[in-house]
């Protein structure tokens, strides 16, 4: 699974949004602003093209990692005890489940997008959702996504999904679908 910090690796999610900055020209500065307010909330990031201190164009970027449910703590404590470590008995016998909370992650971000997208549509700007490919696959299976198509530059809403793959020098994210 990809954590939110991993999504910022190499600033790849921003590079993969550059083509949506129609007002960006050579010589403009690229700036990234985090947690900026808009009506109905805040946006995780804005990628902006600026010239002489004035914003020439921007896109909004929301990213959603997976949410977890339950706690893994009792399971870790039991494993450590199995390996011979001295572990406190606090909550070690708990059988509560834990795991990925796919439904909550999908619900959370889709409601946010529903509220924020009209602002971007009114401004004729783009809002991009950045997720792991596995979360987008889940949403495609569990929700009605049949009306979605390959992203076109004119679309106000874009979904960018990233995959995580193991490379010789560790793990790396890369754009897998738009």
Image (spheres, helix red, strand yellow):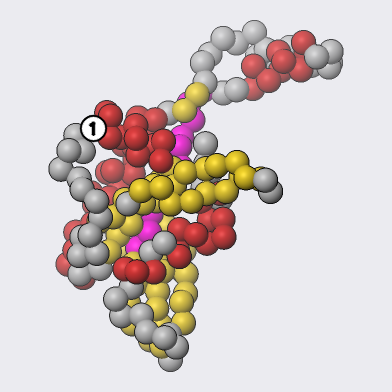
Residue 21 vertical placement versus 41 (above, below): below
Report if residue 64 lies within the magenta region: yes
Residue at image point 27% right, 28% down: 142
* Residue displayed at 41% across by 36% down: 134
At x 28%, y 35%, the residue is 140
Q: Position of residue 88 (x, y in %)?
A: 77, 16
Q: Toward the viewer: 104 or 164?
A: 164
Q: Give coordinates of residue 176: x percent, y percent.
A: 41, 47
In this picture, residue 172 sits left or right of residue 45? right
Q: Percent position (x, y) of residue 40?
A: 27, 56
* Res 53 seen here: no
Q: Which residue is mark 1?
A: 143
Residue 83's x, y, as percent?
80, 14
Residue furthest to the bottom: 52
Q: Residue at x 36, y 80 (%)?
A: 24
Please state which of residues 14 and 100 is positioned toward the viewer in this rendering. Answer: 14
Please name the predominant secondary structure of the magenta segment in the image.
strand
- Would residue 108 be seen by someone viewing this image from the given angle? yes
Q: Which residues are magenta?
A: 60-70
178 vs 35: above or below? above
């Amino acid at each position: 699974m990809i954590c939110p910090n991993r999504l910022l690796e190499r600033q790849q999610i921003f590079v993969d949004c550059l083509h949506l900055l129609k007002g960006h020209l050579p010589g403009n500065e690229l700036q990234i602003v985090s947690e900026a307010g808009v009506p109905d909330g805040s946006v995780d990031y804005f990628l902006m093209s600026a010239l002489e201190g004035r914003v020439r164009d921007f896109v909004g970027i929301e990213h959603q990692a997976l949410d977890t449910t339950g706690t893994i703590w009792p399971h870790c404590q039991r494993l450590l005890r199995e390996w011979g470590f001295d572990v406190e008995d606090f909550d070690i016998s708990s059988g509560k489940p834990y795991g990925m909370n796919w439904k909550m992650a999908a619900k959370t971000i889709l409601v946010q997008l529903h509220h924020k997208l009209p602002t971007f549509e009114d401004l004729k700007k783009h809002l991009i959702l950045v997720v792991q490919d596995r979360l987008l696959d889940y949403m495609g299976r569990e929700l009605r996504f049949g009306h979605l198509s390959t992203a076109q530059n004119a679309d106000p809403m874009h979904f960018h999904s990233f995959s995580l793959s193991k490379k010789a020098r560790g793990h790396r994210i890369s754009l897998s679908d738009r």
